[in-house]
Amino acid sequence: MPDRSALHWQRLDTLLAEALGHDPTERRAFLRDACAEDPALYQEAAAMLAEADKAAEVLGESAAPFAATLLAAEAEPPGIPAGMRVGPYRIEGEAGRGGMGVVYLARRADGAFEKTVALKLVKRGMDTDEVLARFRRERQVLASLEHPGIARLLDGGAAPDGRPYLAMEYVEGEPITAYAERRGLGVEARLALFGRACEAVQHAHRRLVVHRDLKPSNILVAEGEDGAPEVKLLDFGIARLLEAAPDEALTRTTLRRLTPAYAAPEQVRGGAITTATDVYALGVVLYELLAGQRPPRSPKPPSAVAPVGRSRSLRGDLDTICLKALREEPEARYPSVEALLDDLHRHREGLPIQARRATAGYRVRKFVGRHRVAVIGTGVVVLALSAAFVGLAAAQQNAARERDRAEEVAAFLTDLLQRPNPLVSRGDTVTVREVLDEGAARIERELADQPELRADLMAVMASAYLGLGHHAEAERLLRGALAERRRLFGDGHESVEHTLSPLAWALYAQGRYAEAEPLLREALALRQRRRDPEAVASVMNGLGRVLWKLGRPAEAERMLRDALDTSRRPGVDPQTATVTLTNLGHILREQGRTEEAEAVYRDALARRRAHWGEEHPEVAGAVVNLALALQSQGTLGEAERLFREGLEMRRRTQGPAHADVGIDLSQLAGVLLEQGQVGEAEAVYREAIGIQRRALATGHDPTYLSETLHALALLLIEAERRAEAAALLEEAVALRQQVYGDDDPCPCRAEMEGALRAVRSAPTSYRPGPS
């Protein structure tokens, strides 16, 4: 049975751990209540509390077991000097100290092989039989773990003074939270790092090993030779083999090691340690990684305390996941790290998470996520019902009647989408369009006497059509919704404002820029009246793009620079600034200011990678933009490499027949042609034209196809294949006529017509001039 001293320190350990779990202003009051019948214990605990933060920083573990030493201000024993050998290793210097061990940087010195290792020894003065037994056990635990995310045990032995040592893989990294903050990582990139840490913990759990001290300083991120981040878990020194027979000398509470801020409630109380203990600690790490701070004793959702630019991305599923992992009762948490990891995967893939009740609206949003993944493989652009429904519900959350309407929208869409699987194709036709067409017809047929709900559903269905690239049908529905909302609420109503921008986008996507401009200016005036900087910046972005397309670059640049200033205000999502930078880069490049454009594109690419990770359509687009800037400066080899990188990422993330793939192929062909690779350039142009022609059927902007036809025609003229060139030029001119009529702002129209006239009138001597 433990002696009185052991019980005394056990109680102090628990008191200090629980006190540190309170808000700093409440800690002394907690100790007074807890020690009301033992004033001497209160004085001792209060003195320890005063030293706790400093002690925890030095020790990396609970300060309470070492409080007597700390309060006595005993000096640390001297370390091993550099140059001294421990077994076959030569000490190079001290790397760090913990509660029971010292870690040295060392190198193999016996000539067997060259390797830098982290050499861990028990501190002098702590090499009691119990601690030595724990240390030997750490070596046994580490030897059973073989995973790329866990620092490997390489060797073990005894130092000249008899203390045991471990030679471990040396990890030159930084804590996961510090790495994420220093790199300014976005939510997706942070989740990717955390997922790798979970996979390593899951490996240990499958071998019946619980870490028991998971915290950022034990989850390091290092960069591999290719610059990609690698996650490594350290310090299984307090891990426990669940299958091991109990041994009082090894489980005595006087030797419990924990970090109070990351310790589960049952761990602080000295209760049973299970895999749920590590789930709790991972929940704290995830919360800190996403919110930028550790959770308080009664944790709020991380979105409530996260930096403004990140909080929006955390609302909903991520809030739910974090709070479930942090439940006080072990049985109420995720039953395993695997379950936690599964919900994170489900969130990232747009699937309903297991921790959340599936309401009608939630099912609609997640159906769209499932639909997105399934449809991409067919080359069809994704549905956008989820974002539309969320926006509708958010705009209507202040009145019960409006909330009821949002639920009616959800019920309608749930009924529509749960009919026979719309992802099943008949022949070569994907039936998603059929489902949307049925929904649009039902709106007209069934809701004539409910104009508000009818307008809401028209707007939501239009968003779905936009996501699929069916811009003409989206335009029809949005015009109907806009007219209905103007009639019901007046021109200045918020619902009118929310309809103007999508309608302008539907027109923009069809190349009808002059019609889009007045709609965006009306939307901008309404949003400026609301004083919502993020909404204002968003409309300014769209208006800047329209002005650019209308051939007014100086005006477009001014608009985008105003948008950039607006997007940098407090409370605005950082991705708004990224979009603005991208649009500004286009304007600068079009004006021949290629070095300025390159700098802007590089900034935008870094922001997109930080937010989305390494594999996303937005990142692919940013890579291609940078390639365009380098091509404009004549750096053709590097431009070609980036075009191919962006193109392959686009194919993987959006599908091989996506309209954007056609655009990227056309741009790749251009840089191939500049390098004299004429045959390959022609083949790539033809592949691009095939994809872009198919995209016309969904309402895609015809001007992209006209530009690709023009480029291939010029190549054919050089090859003296004039008849083919003339046919392509005729098609290109007809497409631009379809979009602009006789009022085409782009000089490329005159170039196409001039080339066509010259080929027809002097087919044997015409050569294209500089474009």
Image (cartoon, rainbow, N blue to C red):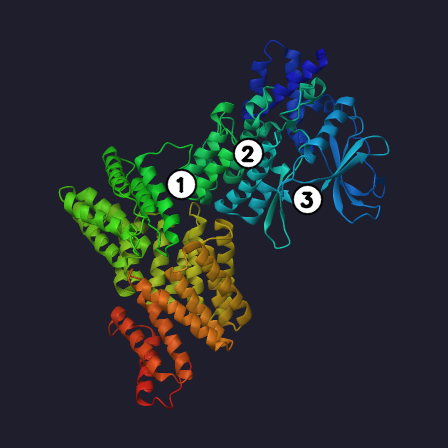
- Residue at 72% x, 28% y is 137
Circle 3 residue: 171
In this view, the residue in front, 203 or 484, is 203
Q: Earlier in the sequence, mark 1 or mark 2?
A: 2
Q: Secondary structure at mark 3?
A: loop
Q: Secondary structure at mark 2?
A: helix
Separation of disc 1 and disc 3 at Cα? 35 Å
Q: Position of residue 760 (x, y in %)?
A: 30, 86
The vertical placement of 589 against 763, above or below, is above
Circle 2 residue: 282
Q: Position of residue 250 (x, y in %)?
A: 70, 22
In the picture provided, is 266 more to the left or to the right than 443? right
Separation of disc 1 and disc 2 at Cα? 22 Å
Amino acid bearing label 3: Val
Amino acid bearing label 2: Leu
Mark 2–mark 3 CB contact (< 8 Å): no
Circle 1 residue: 351
- Residue at 64% x, 23% y is 49
Of badges 1 and 3, nearer the viewer stands: 1
The vertical placement of 217 against 33, above or below, is below
